[in-house]
Amino acid sequence: MENKKALAAVWQFVKFGMVGAVNTILSYVIYNFCYYALNSGVHIANITGFVITVFIAYLLQSRFVFRQDENAEKRVWWKVLLKTYVSYSFTGLFLTELLIWLWINVIDLGQYLGGVCEWLSGFGITFDQYDLAASLVPLMNLVVTIPLNFVINKFWAYRQRKPGAPDKEPRDS
């Protein structure tokens, strides 16, 4: 039984990752469409992609990842949607900016990438070590933000209480 639960949890995380991959690609397409076709600035393009893809994440996650448990309290769709926007705003805006600052300004990742840049130049790929750091940091951040997004969404945004379950654990007096 525990193996079945563990497998279900892993499968749920995989589905979450697939929704995330679709949304990442879609966000990139929307960003480029807004920036190049509509001549919007980078911030408008980014915000537009964010707003649209978080809504799509909500729809896909509700349907395929965090399905409604019919034996639990019914979710209120707009509360889940609002919590989804809040959770992705925290990780996608605040946390990623903090991590970028840490990688670039505190750790100074670029100082460690000179050898990688030299190796890449052997293949005709030229990068300044600090530009390479700027390109790698968003990918490195995914190691932190994907699992955190999963946990926040599973246990907060899409959480359902069983009927009769207390909202919080009772305190010992």
Image: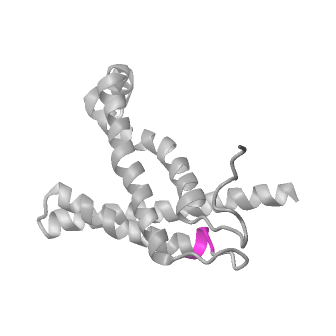
Q: Residue 139 versus residue 5: which sits nearer the camera?
A: 5
Q: Is residue 65 magenta?
A: yes
Location of residue 125 in the rendering, given as x and y in whole percent from the top left corner:
30, 36
**Main secondary structure found in the magenta portion:** helix
Of 27 and 82, which appears nearest the observer?
82
Above or below 70: residue 14? above
Colour scheme of the picture: one colour
Name the quadrant containing residue 155.
bottom right
Q: Is residue 40 left or right of residue 110?
A: left
Q: Quadrant of the N terminus?
A: bottom right
Residue for point 77% across, 55% down:
6
Q: Residue at coordinates 57% horizontally, 75% vertically from top-left?
A: 75
Name the residue at 65% across, 75% down.
73
Relative to the observer, which residue lies in front, 164 or 154?
A: 164
Give the residues drawn in magenta, as a range. Answer: 63-67
79 relative position to 125: left or right:
right
Q: Quadrant of the C terminus?
A: top right
Q: Position of residue 115 (x, y in %)?
A: 38, 21
| Residue drawn at 30 percent across, 36 percent down | 134
Residue sitting farthest toward the right = 1
Relative to residue 71, is residue 106 depicted above or below?
above
**Residue 126 spot, x, y in % from top left:** 27, 33
Task: Identify the image quadrant of residue 32.
Answer: bottom left
Q: Is residue 101 highlighted in magenta?
A: no
- Percent of width and height locating residue 121: 32, 29
Apparent side of residue 21 relative to residue 10 in the rendered image (left or right) = left
**Residue 126 visible in this rendered orientation of the protein:** no
Quadrant of the rendered structure where residue 154 is?
bottom right
For the question of whether residue 52 can be seen, the reply is yes
Q: How many marks?
A: 0
Q: Residue furthest left?
A: 39
